[in-house]
Amino acid sequence: MTLPFENDTSVIIRKYAKKSIKESKSKTILSVLTIMLSVALLSGFILSVVGMATETKRGLQTTNHAIYYNINHKQIEELRRDSRIADSRIFIQAGNTQVDNYLVIPVYIEQNDSNIAVEEIVEGQYPIGLYDVAVDKAYLSRLGLPAELGTKITVPFYDGSSETFTVVGLTDNGSTERTYSLYCSEEYAHTGKQFETSVTVLTVQLANTAQMSSENFKEIVQKIGTDYGVTPQHSDYNDGFAASLEPNQENIMIISIFSIAVLLVSYLVIYSIFYIYVQNQVREFGQLRTMGATAKQIKTILRTQGKLLCILGTILGLIIGGTAAFLFKPDGWSCQNTALVSVLTFCIVYAMVWLAVSKPAKIAGSVSPIEAAKNTGYQSTQLYSKKLHRKITPFSMAVMGCSRNRRKWIMTVLSLGVAGVMFMGGTTLISSLDMERFSRQGLLEYGEFEINLSRNAVRNDPHGTTGVQLNNPLNDDLIRNIAQIEGVKEVTEYKTLEAKFEYNKASRKDKLVPFTSEQQKILKQYLSAGTIDYQAMIENKEILVLRNEYAEYVFDWTFQVGDTVRFRWFDGQSYQETEYTIAGEISDDIFKDPIGGKLFGKTGFFLLPDQLLQKMVVPNFNFTSHLLVGINNFSLEPEVREKMNGLVETIPTVTMETLHNLYQDSEAMYQRTSLVIWGLSGFIMLFAVINLINTLIATTLSRKHEFSTLRSIGMEKKQLQWTIQWEGILLAFWNIGITLAVGTPVGYSIVRYLNSVGDDTWVWKFPFIYMGAYIIISIFLPLIISAIIIRILQQKSIVEQLRETT
């Protein structure tokens, strides 16, 4: 905006800014490269995180929000008429049938126009006739039959009967599980013998969920069920969908920290580039002031350059960042998210560039014609030494060069140091991960093999874990067979009873774990509140609570000693309910104890006397839900694993986790994590390299006249070369010093923080190899850049260089 008596010089300023950008090629290229990297990092990282969340949300759009089970036809009709429910689909499931070493699960899925996703029929159609079925191609392959429509299959059921069906539909989910669904017709679901004891489930999607909070969503799910006589035990909400209704605070924190780090380094580099540019162009700014340019106009010239460079760098950066994010998560790509992130990134980066350019612009605007005429290209409060004689060497001249350009060197060293510290933090993490500790999570901290009840079997049983335990495959015969394998040291049993608890308006499935009178001793060592008396707890129906820290994280409250907790569970014949009083609280430190961690590694929130647990179920109930197998010598692990796999493969209702498999998975994850850390560190280092190149080039070229004068009075080419290279080595020295002095405690602090939050898979180790490579690169990179600069200087003769002015 100009006043009536002012000349509008905006066009001239813009043209001058563009001309300066074209002429100052090194400044332009380095500035655009810095901004481009900054924008690419920010937009790519943010879009990748947002893409993962978007992909999850899109997946949740076709999943159920809640389920109501064990309901009748009247309740289904009433629920469907409720305006709070937008969509629904009926599932009816019969009991599991074990055939050889796999399971068959008869199921009927309502074929209505619902948004709730079901298994896709890739060939044929969904069954209509009484004995029509749809099955997966893998199931027919297991039976040794052709994966063709019209194939006849005979299915033996758990009650001893068998029926023959005609395949009218095929699915192809590529599953390698040993559990197969037998999709039956509606007619068979209502009249077939296998569905006489089936469980009817109504899966629903609620209306207007976009306006709900997570807590409000959970309350509505329970309220709808209560309104139509569905007990809380027979209604459940989708945890993943409930979590999606709240902002992911962890993602927000990660994005914020990452963005601040990138913007800080970018700010230092842009500031340094423009500061050096201003110092080297002081004479030019003085000439502009002599011709009548105002301080405001000179500031505007610098800011216009920053704006133009920002626009160009942002466009290139958004293309690179957006492409990388799309390749990383194509299913999470969204034009709307991309547009929003692009605008946000541009605004943030523009503000960063404006701040970075402001100080150099202010310096340029304050230059007077007289100061410009006196300018020598250096900034020093003491140009002359009191010493009458001094030894002139390439090293001493390099030190003088650094001291006369202190601010330039400080900014360069600072940006190099910040990048080095971030590199040090990342490589410390890479070096400090203990792969064995990382692999030995859960019970595998104390053994090499963990055998569990199959999640598929548990999920498909009407009574969950308890239903599978009624015919428990983790029996004495299996334990005996495992113990007889050569190399097996011990087999440890873990007993649990699945139950649903109600406390402080929360309802959730958990497991009750028994303890014996002999185990009181170790429990008392970690008793943080209340009392433990084995016999009194049996008589008074009392329990102990653990993991209160986790309860506070999940529920925002903790279990209190003296309160009562209501439980509901299946006892093997029917569902039972009762209340238990909390007698004491056990500290989570018990899991750090080798004995306590092994004994109670599978506990949830509750412990109770084993005699009290026995009274809760039918006689001779087998509580075992996990087996832990330890071996004598790890060198025997391959042979033991092969024999264990042979045993487990014959039992479809169990699965096995091995330390060997987890170690392989951990290595793959470690490689991915290392790649991410190296990628981020590499990008950050590029910022520092850009600043290093800018400093060495700008400082050296601004002193061409000085170097030519020195050459004219006898300085050799080799001496000039060493002078410039010593300046680079001095930069490397300060960079290495800052990296070691600050980066080492930063890396140590990161590892200690991870340990403090319970992640003991990190053991601090100094990254000697990575640091050695970093030191070598830090020294040789300035030497290489200096060599290139010297080659540029040598393209002109001494006489030609003397004729040029700085």
Image (spheres, rainbow, N blue to C red):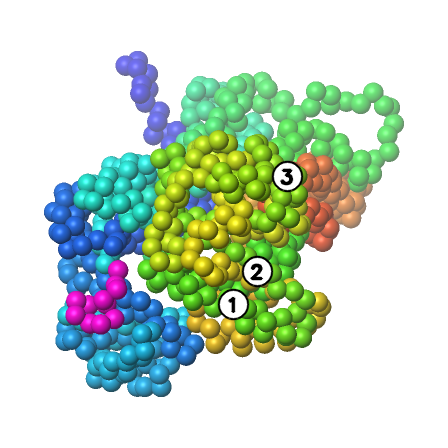
Secondary structure of residue under mark 1: loop
- Classify 152 as above or below 121: below
Disc 3 crowd rating (10 Å Cα; few below 14, some 14-19, many 20+) is some
Residue 528 seen from this side: yes
> Whole-percent x and y of residue 365?
50, 21
Amino acid type assigned to the residue bearing label 3 in the image: Lys
User: Which of the 4 image quadrants contains residue 308?
Assistant: top left
**Which of the marked residues, 3 or 2, is nearer the chain's N terminus?**
2
What label does residue 493 carry, if any?
2
**x and y, in percent, of residue 699 in the image:** 64, 37
Left or right, residue 152 beside residue 778: left
- Mark 3–mark 2 CB contact (< 8 Å): no
Question: What is the quadrant of residue 742 in the picture?
Answer: top right
Residue annotated with mark 3: 524
Assign a secondary structure to mark 2: strand
- The verdict on residue 732 being magenta is no
Q: Are marks 3 and 1 in contact (CB under 8 Å)?
A: no
Rendered location of residue 434, percent (x, y)? 65, 53
Front position in the image: 272 or 279? 272
Cα–Cα span, label 3 and label 1:
31 Å
Amino acid at dot 2: Glu
Report the side of 711 relative to 237 (left or right).
Answer: right
Residue type, mark 1 in image: Asn
Q: CA distance from mark 3 to mark 2?
A: 22 Å
Image-based side of 67 in relation to 560, left or right: left
Q: Nearer the viewer, residue 312 or 615?
A: 615
Query: Mark 1 Cα within 10 Å, few/some/many (few <14, many 20+)?
Result: some
Residue range (magenta): 189-199
Q: Earlier in the sequence, mark 3 or mark 1?
A: 1
Give the spatial CA distance, label 2 vs label 1.
10 Å
x, y percent for residue 160: 32, 78
